[in-house]
Image: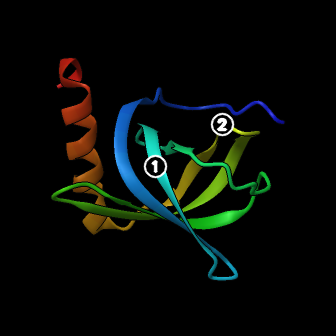
Amino acid sequence: MEQERRSTARIPFNASAEIVDLADTRFKTRVTELSRDGCYLNNLTALKIGTPVIIKIASATDFFEAHAQVASVHSNLGTGLSFLDVEPPYLPVLQKWLVAANPERK
C-alpha cells in the first residue's frame, strides 16, 4: 500500500456512492470523508492505485459526479480517491457539502 499525499484535509461525511470503472463495472459504496480534492470510500472492492474511475455521490437532496483516480488502498477498509475533473455544475454541490459538514470553516 502506498501512502496517499493529500493537498487538503478531509472531513467526516456520510453519503451513498457508486464507482464506475473503465470497463463500466459499478460498485456501490459509501463516502466517509470528503475534501475539495477527493474522498475516502468505505469499500472492500480492490482497485489498483492509479485506476481511473467516475465517482457518483448522492445525498438526500443533491448529486455530485467527478472523474477521479484511486490514490490509496487500505485492504479490508477502504479506498482514497483524488478528483481529477469536476464539471462546473457539480462544484457548488461539493462546496455546499463541505460547508455543511464543517461549519466552523464558513
Q: Which residue extends farthest bottom?
A: 23
Q: Nearer the viewer, residue 19 or 7?
A: 19
Judged left or right of residue 46, residue 44 is: left
Residue shown at 25% from the left, 43% from the top = 97
Relative to residue 59, is residue 29 drawn left or right?
Answer: right
Q: Is residue 75 left or right of residue 106?
A: right
Q: Nearer the viewer, residue 43 or 9?
A: 43
- Tell me which corner region of the image, top left, top right, bottom left or bottom right, holds residue 52: bottom right
What sort of colour scheme is used for the picture? rainbow
Check whether the beta carbons of the residues at disc 1 and disc 2 lie within 8 A of each other.
Answer: no
Look at label 1 and name its amino acid.
Arg
* Quarter of the figure with the N terminus: top right
Point out which mark residue 96 bears. none
Helix, strand or loop under label 2: loop
Mark 2 surroundings: few (<14), some (14-19) or many (≥20) residues within 10 A: few
Question: Which residue is located at x 47 percent, y 26 percent?
Answer: 9
Instruction: Name above or below for residue 80 compared with residue 87.
Output: above
Circle 2: residue type: Leu
Picture coordinates of residue 95 (x, y %)?
Answer: 25, 45
Which residue is painted at 70% across and 33% down in the image? 4
Q: Residues within 10 Å of mark 1 (few under 14, many from 20)?
A: some
Residue receiving disc 2: 77
Q: Percent position (x, y) of residue 77?
A: 66, 36
Name the spot of residue 62 as percent of width and height, x first: 21, 60
What residue sits right under mark 1 in the picture? Answer: 30
